[in-house]
Image: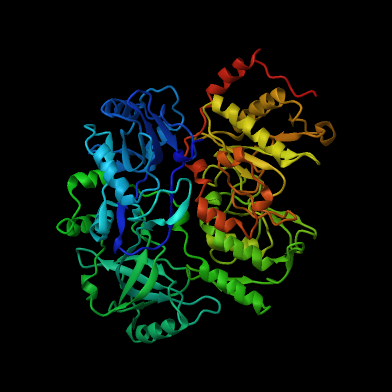
Amino acid sequence: MDPILQPMLASLADAPLEDPHLVYEPKYDGIRAIAEISPTPPVHLWSRLGNEKTRQFPEIARALDKWARKLKAPVVLDGEIVALDGNGEPIGFQNLQGRIHLSDGSVPTGAPVAFIAFDILREGRTDLRDRPWTERRAALERVFGKTGSPLLRMSAVARGDGRALHTEALARGWEGLIAKQADSLYKSGKRTPDWRKLKIVHEQEFVIGGWTEPRHTRSYFGALLLGVYDDAGRLIYVGHTGTGFNEKELARLMKLLKPLEIPACPFANRPKTNERAHWVRPELVAQIKFTEWTADSRLRHPVYLGLRDDKRPEDVRREDVERIRRDAAPRARVSASNARRAGSSTRRSPSAASVPNTSDIVEQLRALEDARRDGVLALPDGGRLNVTNLNKVFWPKQKLTKGDLMRYYARIAPFILPAVADRPLVMKRYPNGISGKWFYQHRVSDLPPGVTTDVVSVVEKRAQIIGGNLTTLLYTAQLAAISQDPWFSRVQHPQYADYAAFDLDPSEGVTFDRVLDVARWIRDELDVLGAIGVPKTSGASGLHVYIPMPPRTPYDAGLLFCQIVATVVAQKHAKIATIERSVKARGKRVYIDFLQNILGKTLATAYSARASDYAGVSMPLTWADVDAGVDPHDFTIQSAPARAEKAGDLWSALRSSKGVNLERVSRYVDGVGSGRLKADKS
């Protein structure tokens, strides 16, 4: 692929909202696209991973073709394809899902779309990537400034001062801003701090209406109970925070709270608390930062910043989107037309951004291990978790310990928690490390507070651990469950699989290059079916390819789908791939195991540590990685966090797809030849 088709990527790092050396653009919630445009059709749209998207967005291609007739020379643009609401405003990524499998060039029903350009990489024979952003922007405005089509737009820009654009982002619910060095060159395929993502974090005052008893070894109190006043003058409970305090601040607050204690709850909606609540006269106001308001009007991930003495408690109201919009409107410096170009986004489902910062947990674990003692972790939600034997060696070759495992899971939590959310877990425990005896454990009793459980089996009535929160993740690691092994279905519908999977297992002596070959052949068959596959290393010697299933797909359907594709690949490439279960019959081939797609069976999830001799991690890959060739030994509990932070959550592609169209399978089988697939008899 031409390097110019590989987009430059932004890093997640702080940047000031006022800086003469920076320019600010809205952060779009769409599909990144490089557009190759020529005065003579056709136009080509390329995704970040090098996949052509032209047929998925035919109306954009036609609009670009029409506009390109005015050009004197070809151009290459960088931009974003976004969905639009009824007012022509950009909306969330999920509204593009109907385009994922479109391949016939027709215009699907659903939200209209637009292409928003924010960079120009080539004009005629001139490569502009080695020019500063200011020169490229001037060229973009000259070339693309007047397209004459509502489907073709140019990004809004604020130069040197991003405060007004930030205000607009708050008012419109955007994901954030992109801050770019004004003199930055365009570095294709590179992620650099020259471009930085500025995520939106909410912050406002809340009235303190009480506190809860501390747990375990914490001093003074566990959490503050927070509220706002409504228009009727009632104090409404909105959440609690147990994070953001040091020991000194805990003591200072307790000294202020104790004289205010009262017997009656001051909230109109009395909260239920895990620990005993103490009520106070609502006289103290705290400054709190949080990620967002939940659908039931609760704070998500609130963090205490300090007390305010310049705000009367009775004046504290919820600063919701409508209020911010009204207040921001007179100050906004972005024109209405630019605001439309700038875009907006709806909130995504829980993801990496919604997981609390875990750097403090990493430091606590390191301090306990260095001191060679057991202890209690203070968790971001105010909870506590006992940890023991952190010095025990789990991987002898690398001299990596149980403490290393727990620190890994603390660091990778923003990526692995969405992958296991709501999924029953089967624990494979290694109390004496990978060289010792291990055993499976489906259910446990005497759980600490915060560990999620539910009954998911109609046969066994005891509760099973459910993945998805930090306490549960760290607790299972404390039990020496090295890997995270979730069901393919969620607790809400355990009989329906959200995805199916191929487990590629090389026989002894077969190289990983052969495994990659088989993965590519599976991808080819999935392409025929209009399905996407998401690959990852197994963390040991193999590779997994996952396929999203449509809603309410029984496990049997996913199993049959994978069996059909595996059989076709084994027939076409019989010398390298096989579906034979017998180890002896496989010979020197790669076994395509489709039998993991059975209710209750598990595979190690994406980002999971593994009990392999090199401390491997099951690492999500792009198909570009598979094509280029990778070594699974490159992904370990020591290297994987940096890789994930650099690449982003590649596993999210599995959650964002509608799933394969299973009706295509019968036509696919007929197209093989006789309509019946022969078993692998070699």
Q: Position of residue 28 (x, y in %)?
A: 35, 46
Query: Relative to 27, does residue 5 appear above or below in the rendering?
Result: above
139 sits left or right of 601 in the view:
left
Which of 464 and 500 lies nearest the eye of the viewer? 500
The part of the image, by quadrant, that contains residue 21 is bottom left
538 sits left or right of 299 in the view:
right
Q: Residue at x 83, y 31 (%)?
A: 585
Q: Residue at x 67, y 27 (%)?
A: 569
Q: Position of residue 449 (x, y in %)?
A: 55, 66
State which quarter of the image contains the C terminus. Answer: top right
Which of 451 and 605 lies nearest the eye of the viewer? 605
Residue 227 in sight here: yes
Q: Residue at x 65, y 43 (%)?
A: 600
Query: Relative to 657, does residue 204 appear above or below in the rendering?
Result: below
Task: State the scheme by which the image is colored.
Answer: rainbow
Residue 539 in sight here: no
